[in-house]
Each structure stands twice: as structure tokens, then as C-alpha cells.
Amino acid sequence: MGDAPDSGTPDLDAIKDQAIAAIHDARTTEDIRQVTAEVSGKKSPLAQASRRMGALDPDARRELGKQLHDVRSTIEALLDARRSEIAAEELATELAGSRIDLSEYIPGSIPAPAERGHLSLVSLTRDALEDVFVGMGFEVAEGPEIESDWYNFGALNIPPAHPARSMWDTFYLDLGAPESTMLRTHTSPVQIHLMEDAVAHDTLPIHAVMPGRCYRRDTPDARHLAVFHQIEGLVVDRGISFADLAGTIEVFTTAYFGPDIHSRLRPAYFPFTEPSAEYEVTCTICHGEGCRTCSQTGWIELGGCGMLDPAVFAAVGIDPEEWSGFAFGFGIDRCAQMRHQIADMRALNENDLRFLRQF
Ligand code: DAH
């Protein structure tokens, strides 16, 4: 540093090199502040060199002024650049320390808003069925999915070893209770719960529907599922006749399926009703003409029904001389299948969005 002794002019190259080295070595905001003062402040070699200009002749002064200006500009630019670099480094260190994850602000990685789903077709069908029955004056009730032998079979007049049990084979659960427990095979046990309650609280008559999930040891196919849904109906009142049952079923059928779909009852056997009937509705595929789906009969079976058997009344302690009633039960999944003409019922459980989005 210093003057070039012979010419009397300062060694600007040396001043510049020293400044560049000092700027380069600065590591922190504090360093760069000090370096700025050293290389461009009032006491810097650059400032001292400018002060010399007054002693020079006009030509030499002009020449030195130009050179000083260039050196100063270079130094200022380097100072600015290093200052910004240091600021950026210090910010990055600070952010890393506070663990702010800025990556979520990267445009491409903002997750798409979640798609909104809707109720499954089974729930939609259950709700629609409930609405029809509520409109006819029924209440909606529910019962447990795990039942004892008594509720699933015994009280429904299906004693142990009765051949009808094989029709309703199920999954048994070992819950350590003295009586065997099982996943219910139909919603008929809810009839027993409702009648027991009504007797205990003296609240007869009963007009109720009971929807719910049922289980059977069945192999699924186009018209059966091992886990499926039924809706049960129960009326216990004075002077109830088979005509009330047939009328209720016909009103329900036209209300739910539409005015061209009708019902018919054909004699059948169920242990808990006497007489019993199978409940059939006009085939929704061919509208009664006869097709493959209905085996050319024009009718499709939906469920069972009948007048409450006196043995069931006896099981719950209702006097059959005073009260009479009817019951019915049919598949909710089967109703959905028929109303929406679903070829294979297993589609209800497959979670294929192309299927589910149609409803
Ligand atoms: N529980 C019967 C079944 O799952 C259906 C049924 C038949 C229900 C006759 C009833 C009835 O209430 O009276 O196959």
C-alpha cells in the first residue's frame, strides 16, 4: 500500500487487490460492515488517494480522478454483491435452525382438494325404503347384529335341530355365554326385541320397520351376498288381518318401484308366521313379459311375510286372543338391484368408482 515513490501517484492496483481480498474474506454481516469502512470509508487508502488529487496538475488530476472512479465502482459493486450473499447465507442458516419447511409452497406439490363422496347405494336405498314406510305410518327401529340363539331362532319358533335352521346357517361366535351367539341371519330377531319391549313398557300396538345388516354362510353370486341388508316390518294391533298385510305390501311396492310394478303373495313356509307367503314383485327388467332374469315368469321374489304365529306371541308373552299381527322381511340390496337393474349384486361391494358414481 502507499504511493508509487517515483511518480507521486498512488498504486491503485495494489489498493484494489487488497480491497478485493478483504471483501472475499468477509464471512458475516459484521465482517462486511468493517470491510466496507476499511476499503471505502474516510480513512481508506482510496479516500487518502483522492485527497492527493488537489496537489496534481490538471491533466494528471483528471487522469487520477478517472482511475479512482473506476476502482471505487469496482469495489462498491463487490461490496454490494458480497453483502447480499452473506445476507442470503445467514437467512438460510436461520431458517434451517427454525425448521420451517418451505417446500409446501412449491406450486406443483400443493395437493388437489379432496373429492367429496356420498352415501353408498345401499344406504340410499335403505333411506328411500324408510321414507316410504314412515309415510305409511311406521316407525323405524334397529336391533343388534350379534344375537343369541333365542332371538335368532328360538323365539321365532325355530327350536334346536329344526330343519329350517339350515336355511339360515351363519357364523357362530364364542363369547363364553352359556347360550350360543352368532351374527344374525335375518332382521326377524328385531321383532322379538320390539315385542318384549312393548310388553315390558305396556306400549302395544307396534307399527315398525327395522332395517339392518345380516350375515349368512353363503357363497356370493349375482343375487346373493354373505353380508347383506334386510328391512323387516312388524305390525301388532287389534283385528289385523291378512288383507292388511297384502294391502301394505302392494302400497309399498307401487310407492317404491313405481305404478307399473305390483306385488303378489304365494303360499310359503316360515316357522314364525302362519299362514306364510313369499312376496314377489313384477320383474323390473321385462315389466312382466317374461325374461331370463325372472325365469320367464314375469315375477321376482323379494322376501317373505305372513301372520304372526301364536307360538311367537307365546314366546314374548302377548295374548293371541287380544292381539294379532303380520310381519314381512326383504332384502335392501335386492331392492337396489331391481330398481336400478344391477346385473351383479357384488358390484355393491367392489368400490369401483365408475359404478358408485352413477347413484
Ligand atoms: N326372515 C326371513 C328371511 O330372512 C324373511 C321373512 C319371512 C321375514 C317372513 C318375515 C316373515 O318377517 O314374516 O328369509
Image: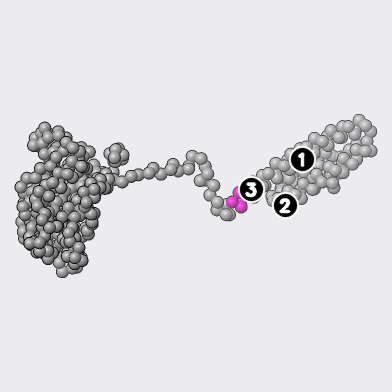
Disc 2 marks a residue whose amino acid type is Glu
Q: Secondary structure at mark 2?
A: helix
Using the image as rendered, state which of residue 156 and residue 264 is in the foreground. Answer: 264
Residue 121, horizontal then vertical, whole percent: 26, 44
Considering depth in this image, is 227 or 252 the residue closer to the camera? 252
Query: Label for residue 75?
Result: 1
Tell me residue 259's x, y (percent): 18, 37
Is the CB of mark 2 within 8 Å of ligand 1? no
Distance from disc 3 to disc 2, alpha carbons, whole Å, reads 14 Å
Quarter occupied by the N terminus: top right
Q: Which color scheme does this rendered protein use?
A: one colour
Tag 3: amino acid: Glu
Q: Secondary structure at mark 1?
A: helix
> Which of the two labelled residues, at mark 3 and mark 1, occupies the earlier sequence position?
1
Is residue 87 shown to the viewer in this render? yes
Which residue does the numbered mark 2 point to in the structure image?
Answer: 30
| Amino acid type at image mark 1 | Ile
Residue pictured at 10% horizontal, 64% vertical = 319
- Determine if residue 193 is in view: no
Of the residues under marks 3 and 2, which one precedes in the sequence?
Answer: 2
In the rendered image, the residue lying farthest to the top is 59
- Indicate which disc residue 89 carries: 3
Start and end of the magenta stretch? 88-95
Q: Is residue 91 magenta?
A: yes
Name the quadrant containing residue 5: top right
User: Few, some or many C-alpha atoms within 10 Å of disc 2 (few <14, some 14-19, many ≥20)?
Assistant: few
- As drawn, the residue found furthest toward the front would be 239
